[in-house]
Amino acid sequence: MQALFRISLAAALMVAVSFGDGRAQRGATPPMQNTTLTAVSGLSVGHHTLAERPTGCTVVLIDGTGAVAAVSVRGGAPGTRETDVLAPDNTVQQINGIAFAGGSAFGLDTASGVMRFLEEKKIGFATSAGPVPIVPAAILFDLNVGSRPDVRPGAACGYEAARAASTGPVAEGSIGAGAGATVGKLAGYGRAMKGGVGSAALRLDSGLIVSALVVVNAAGTVIDPRTGRPVAGVRTADGRSIEDPFALIRRGIAPAGPARDNTTLGVIATNARLTRVEALRIAEMAHGGLARTVVPTHTPNDGDTMFVIATGTFTGDVNLSAAGALAGEVVSDAILSAVRAARGLPGFPAASDIR
């Protein structure tokens, strides 16, 4: 059975490295391994954060001709663009990028900027009139964070995020599409906390990699599924600690009024070679990581959406059940990273601000 191990900082901090002459050199450290979405080679991620209020966009670009992709929407109030193209029975089989943005439905225009950037690079689906970039998009609601709801990401934001895209470790926290993200809105915005962008990666010793990037803007509370303890969510009335989300649910508290403005967005990447149908199954299984880390989730007022990208550079055998289980794990890890890396805003403290 393949041994699962986390791509971790501990591995990067080895105190001895073997050189070509066979000698071990103490104090030498190998380069730190990437623990984020871009651990899957061929992907780059860029953020652009607007200065006028906390909002922005996050873009994932795919090298070459693209990658097999799928999407699973479980929330009852999604805001998406070009997701129908990902159905297994449709013609276009590969995508060139994915755009996530704040700004509610206005933010879907960020994909136009990403398309313009890719068009300049002559990247896209081949047509008789030249390449047409395929860039699905999804948005979250953050218009009430800050005092300027008229400020929202558009095509210029998408272009700048694409231009800034890097294959290096993904920046996390209150940046890009996560700049205005919040969590814990079951009891209203007055007791909510800061959400954000997070990323994580897992690897099998065979070389199979599964990674994720998640933008967390949930009505519910983020819990650590290993301990059951809340990390960020609905604060107590005095604002000093976090309510037990399970107790809230049992008291009948549910999203209502302004608390309906929620969505958690994710993209799972793997170097596995998958069909569209297999990628869809992994997207569906990835929602399990969301469900066990955000309480509650998949409500009628959420737009919870999970994409999968499969680059196909790993040619070994892939157990689909194992890959789907890994997808759930990296989604959970990415959600925790998002709220732990977030920085507080006025009225929305971060996890690091709450004892």
Image (spheres, rainbow, N blue to C red):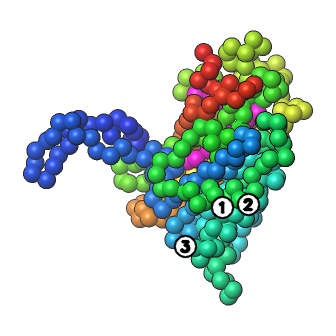
Residue type at the position of mark 2? Ala
Residue 141 in view (yes/no): yes
- Residue range in magenta is 212-224
* Residue 307 relative to residue 15: left or right: right
Q: Name the residue furthest front.
A: 52
Reply above or below: 200 against 253.
below
Q: CA distance from mark 2 to mark 3?
A: 23 Å
Reply above or below: 134 against 31.
below
Which residue in the protein does label 1 denote? Answer: 159
Residue type at the position of mark 1? Tyr
Q: Is residue 252 magenta?
A: no
For the residue labelled by badge 2, is the local secondary structure a helix, a strand or a loop?
helix
* Residue 58 image position (x, y, % from top left): 64, 51
Which residue in the protein does label 2 denote? Answer: 155
* Residue 208 image position (x, y, % from top left): 42, 54
* Residue 163 image position (x, y, % from top left): 58, 60
The tag earlier along the polypeptide, 1 or 3, is 3
Crowding around mark 2 (Cα neighbors within 10 Å: few <14, some 14 to 19, many 20+) is some
